[in-house]
Image (cartoon, helix red, strand yellow):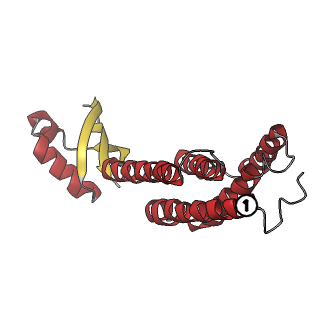
Protein backbone atom coordinates (compact mmCIF):
# COMPACT_ATOMS: atom_id res chain seq x y z
CA UNK A 1 0.00 0.00 0.00
CA UNK A 2 1.54 3.32 -1.00
CA UNK A 3 2.23 5.51 2.01
CA UNK A 4 1.15 8.66 0.23
CA UNK A 5 -2.18 7.44 -1.14
CA UNK A 6 -4.24 9.29 1.47
CA UNK A 7 -1.90 12.27 1.38
CA UNK A 8 -3.78 15.38 0.24
CA UNK A 9 -0.83 16.22 -2.04
CA UNK A 10 -1.30 12.98 -3.96
CA UNK A 11 -2.89 13.72 -7.39
CA UNK A 12 -4.67 10.33 -7.34
CA UNK A 13 -6.52 11.37 -4.19
CA UNK A 14 -8.02 14.44 -5.85
CA UNK A 15 -8.75 12.46 -9.00
CA UNK A 16 -10.82 10.01 -6.96
CA UNK A 17 -12.69 12.88 -5.31
CA UNK A 18 -13.53 14.42 -8.70
CA UNK A 19 -14.74 11.07 -10.03
CA UNK A 20 -16.71 10.60 -6.82
CA UNK A 21 -18.53 13.90 -7.40
CA UNK A 22 -19.38 12.80 -10.95
CA UNK A 23 -20.54 9.42 -9.63
CA UNK A 24 -22.72 11.03 -6.94
CA UNK A 25 -24.40 13.34 -9.45
CA UNK A 26 -25.34 10.47 -11.74
CA UNK A 27 -26.44 8.27 -8.83
CA UNK A 28 -28.79 11.05 -7.70
CA UNK A 29 -30.21 11.33 -11.22
CA UNK A 30 -30.62 7.56 -11.59
CA UNK A 31 -31.95 6.71 -8.13
CA UNK A 32 -33.85 9.82 -7.05
CA UNK A 33 -35.17 11.20 -10.34
CA UNK A 34 -35.63 7.98 -12.34
CA UNK A 35 -36.06 5.01 -9.98
CA UNK A 36 -38.05 6.80 -7.27
CA UNK A 37 -40.22 8.67 -9.78
CA UNK A 38 -41.51 5.44 -11.33
CA UNK A 39 -41.38 3.01 -8.38
CA UNK A 40 -42.14 5.26 -5.36
CA UNK A 41 -40.15 2.80 -3.20
CA UNK A 42 -38.52 5.11 -0.70
CA UNK A 43 -37.20 2.21 1.42
CA UNK A 44 -34.61 1.23 -1.20
CA UNK A 45 -33.08 4.69 -1.71
CA UNK A 46 -30.66 4.32 1.21
CA UNK A 47 -29.56 0.87 0.01
CA UNK A 48 -28.90 2.00 -3.57
CA UNK A 49 -26.97 5.13 -2.58
CA UNK A 50 -24.79 3.39 -0.01
CA UNK A 51 -24.11 0.52 -2.40
CA UNK A 52 -23.08 2.91 -5.16
CA UNK A 53 -20.79 4.92 -2.87
CA UNK A 54 -19.17 1.83 -1.33
CA UNK A 55 -18.62 0.11 -4.67
CA UNK A 56 -17.09 3.30 -6.05
CA UNK A 57 -14.48 3.64 -3.31
CA UNK A 58 -13.57 -0.06 -3.26
CA UNK A 59 -13.07 -0.27 -7.01
CA UNK A 60 -11.27 3.09 -7.21
CA UNK A 61 -8.64 1.86 -4.75
CA UNK A 62 -8.02 -1.50 -6.39
CA UNK A 63 -4.92 -0.28 -8.24
CA UNK A 64 -3.77 2.26 -5.67
CA UNK A 65 -4.15 0.17 -2.52
CA UNK A 66 -3.19 -3.48 -2.15
CA UNK A 67 -6.65 -5.03 -2.38
CA UNK A 68 -6.76 -8.18 -4.43
CA UNK A 69 -9.52 -8.40 -7.00
CA UNK A 70 -10.75 -11.65 -5.48
CA UNK A 71 -11.14 -9.96 -2.11
CA UNK A 72 -13.17 -7.13 -3.66
CA UNK A 73 -15.48 -9.58 -5.43
CA UNK A 74 -15.77 -11.53 -2.18
CA UNK A 75 -16.95 -8.40 -0.36
CA UNK A 76 -19.73 -7.90 -2.90
CA UNK A 77 -20.68 -11.59 -2.74
CA UNK A 78 -20.87 -11.59 1.07
CA UNK A 79 -23.03 -8.48 0.99
CA UNK A 80 -25.34 -10.04 -1.59
CA UNK A 81 -25.69 -13.29 0.36
CA UNK A 82 -26.37 -11.61 3.70
CA UNK A 83 -28.63 -8.83 2.46
CA UNK A 84 -30.54 -10.01 -0.56
CA UNK A 85 -31.50 -13.40 0.90
CA UNK A 86 -33.72 -11.70 3.46
CA UNK A 87 -35.93 -9.81 1.01
CA UNK A 88 -37.57 -10.60 -2.29
CA UNK A 89 -36.54 -8.01 -4.84
CA UNK A 90 -38.43 -7.57 -8.09
CA UNK A 91 -36.64 -7.92 -11.40
CA UNK A 92 -36.76 -4.15 -11.84
CA UNK A 93 -35.19 -3.56 -8.42
CA UNK A 94 -32.42 -6.05 -9.21
CA UNK A 95 -31.84 -4.27 -12.52
CA UNK A 96 -31.42 -0.97 -10.67
CA UNK A 97 -29.02 -2.62 -8.21
CA UNK A 98 -26.91 -3.88 -11.09
CA UNK A 99 -27.09 -0.48 -12.82
CA UNK A 100 -26.02 1.30 -9.62
CA UNK A 101 -23.02 -1.00 -9.30
CA UNK A 102 -22.20 -0.64 -13.00
CA UNK A 103 -22.28 3.17 -12.96
CA UNK A 104 -20.14 3.26 -9.81
CA UNK A 105 -17.56 0.91 -11.32
CA UNK A 106 -17.42 2.87 -14.59
CA UNK A 107 -16.96 6.17 -12.75
CA UNK A 108 -14.29 4.75 -10.43
CA UNK A 109 -11.97 3.61 -13.21
CA UNK A 110 -8.87 5.67 -13.81
CA UNK A 111 -8.75 5.42 -17.58
CA UNK A 112 -5.47 6.71 -18.97
CA UNK A 113 -5.91 8.71 -22.15
CA UNK A 114 -9.70 8.47 -22.01
CA UNK A 115 -11.51 11.80 -21.62
CA UNK A 116 -13.85 12.44 -18.72
CA UNK A 117 -16.44 13.50 -21.29
CA UNK A 118 -16.55 9.91 -22.57
CA UNK A 119 -17.37 8.57 -19.09
CA UNK A 120 -20.09 11.22 -18.72
CA UNK A 121 -21.55 10.20 -22.10
CA UNK A 122 -21.66 6.55 -20.95
CA UNK A 123 -23.50 7.61 -17.79
CA UNK A 124 -25.98 9.66 -19.79
CA UNK A 125 -26.62 6.73 -22.16
CA UNK A 126 -27.35 4.39 -19.22
CA UNK A 127 -29.72 6.88 -17.57
CA UNK A 128 -31.51 7.68 -20.85
CA UNK A 129 -31.96 3.95 -21.44
CA UNK A 130 -33.53 3.61 -17.98
CA UNK A 131 -35.91 6.54 -18.66
CA UNK A 132 -36.97 5.21 -22.08
CA UNK A 133 -37.58 1.71 -20.73
CA UNK A 134 -39.53 3.07 -17.74
CA UNK A 135 -41.73 5.15 -20.04
CA UNK A 136 -42.31 2.20 -22.35
CA UNK A 137 -43.18 -0.05 -19.39
CA UNK A 138 -45.51 2.54 -17.87
CA UNK A 139 -47.44 2.93 -21.13
CA UNK A 140 -47.69 -0.78 -21.82
CA UNK A 141 -48.08 -2.14 -18.29
CA UNK A 142 -51.22 -4.27 -18.16
CA UNK A 143 -52.84 -6.48 -15.54
CA UNK A 144 -54.57 -9.73 -16.45
CA UNK A 145 -57.57 -11.09 -14.54
CA UNK A 146 -59.99 -13.94 -15.03
CA UNK A 147 -63.68 -13.28 -14.43
CA UNK A 148 -66.97 -15.18 -14.72
CA UNK A 149 -69.35 -13.55 -17.20
CA UNK A 150 -73.08 -14.33 -17.38
CA UNK A 151 -74.30 -12.56 -20.52
CA UNK A 152 -73.79 -15.26 -23.14
CA UNK A 153 -76.16 -13.54 -25.59
CA UNK A 154 -73.76 -10.63 -25.90
CA UNK A 155 -70.88 -13.04 -26.47
CA UNK A 156 -72.83 -14.83 -29.19
CA UNK A 157 -73.39 -11.60 -31.09
CA UNK A 158 -69.63 -11.14 -31.31
CA UNK A 159 -69.76 -7.35 -30.99
CA UNK A 160 -66.33 -6.65 -29.58
CA UNK A 161 -66.84 -2.97 -28.70
CA UNK A 162 -70.08 -3.68 -26.83
CA UNK A 163 -68.42 -6.51 -24.93
CA UNK A 164 -65.45 -4.27 -24.00
CA UNK A 165 -67.82 -1.54 -22.80
CA UNK A 166 -69.86 -4.05 -20.78
CA UNK A 167 -66.72 -5.52 -19.18
CA UNK A 168 -65.40 -2.01 -18.42
CA UNK A 169 -68.68 -1.06 -16.73
CA UNK A 170 -68.71 -4.34 -14.82
CA UNK A 171 -65.14 -4.10 -13.49
CA UNK A 172 -64.73 -0.33 -13.24
CA UNK A 173 -61.56 -0.59 -15.37
CA UNK A 174 -60.86 0.38 -18.94
CA UNK A 175 -60.54 -3.06 -20.50
CA UNK A 176 -58.17 -3.09 -23.46
CA UNK A 177 -58.72 -6.70 -24.60
CA UNK A 178 -60.41 -9.93 -23.58
CA UNK A 179 -60.24 -13.61 -24.41
CA UNK A 180 -62.95 -16.22 -23.89
CA UNK A 181 -61.35 -19.13 -22.11
CA UNK A 182 -64.34 -21.41 -21.55
CA UNK A 183 -68.13 -21.37 -21.98
CA UNK A 184 -70.40 -23.42 -19.73
CA UNK A 185 -73.86 -23.58 -21.34
CA UNK A 186 -75.35 -25.53 -18.45
CA UNK A 187 -74.52 -22.76 -15.96
CA UNK A 188 -75.05 -20.07 -18.60
CA UNK A 189 -71.68 -18.45 -17.86
CA UNK A 190 -68.32 -17.93 -19.48
CA UNK A 191 -64.78 -17.69 -18.12
CA UNK A 192 -63.07 -14.66 -19.66
CA UNK A 193 -59.49 -13.38 -19.39
CA UNK A 194 -59.42 -9.57 -19.37
CA UNK A 195 -56.51 -7.14 -19.61
CA UNK A 196 -56.40 -3.53 -18.44
CA UNK A 197 -53.73 -0.93 -17.81
CA UNK A 198 -52.68 -0.20 -14.27
Q: Which sits in the foreground, 74 or 93?
A: 74
Residue 53 relative to residue 125: left or right: right
Residue hosting label 1 = 11
Is residue 188 shown to the viewer in this render? Answer: no
Q: Is residue 67 above or below residue 26?
A: above
Could you say which is closer to the camera, residue 117 or residue 187? 117
Q: Which quadrant of the view contains residue 10? A: bottom right
Report the front residue among 157 and 47. 47
Where residue 64 sits: x, y (%)?
A: 80, 50
Q: Measuring 16% from the left and 37% from the top, which residue is drawn there? A: 155
Q: Residues within 10 Å of mark 1 (few under 14, many from 20)?
A: few
Q: Position of residue 16 (x, y in %)?
A: 69, 59
- Give 90 or 165, whichever is nearer the viewer: 90
Left or right: 34, with 28 as reference point: left
Residue 98 horizontal/vertical position (percent): 60, 46
- Residue at the image position 37 percent from the left and 44 percent from the top: 144
Total labels drawn: 1
Q: Secondary structure at mark 1?
A: helix
Q: Position of residue 17 (x, y in %)?
A: 68, 64
Q: Quadrant of the C terminus?
A: bottom left
| Left or right: residue 128 compared with residue 42 | left
Residue 147 visible in the shown view: yes
Q: Residue at x 78, y 47 (%)?
A: 62
Amino acid sequence: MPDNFFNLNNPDFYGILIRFIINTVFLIILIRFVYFRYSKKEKFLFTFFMMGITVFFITSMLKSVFIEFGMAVGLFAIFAILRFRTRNFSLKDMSYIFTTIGISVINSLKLVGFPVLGVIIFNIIIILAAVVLEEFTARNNTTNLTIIYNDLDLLKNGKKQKILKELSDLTGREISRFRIREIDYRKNEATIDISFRD
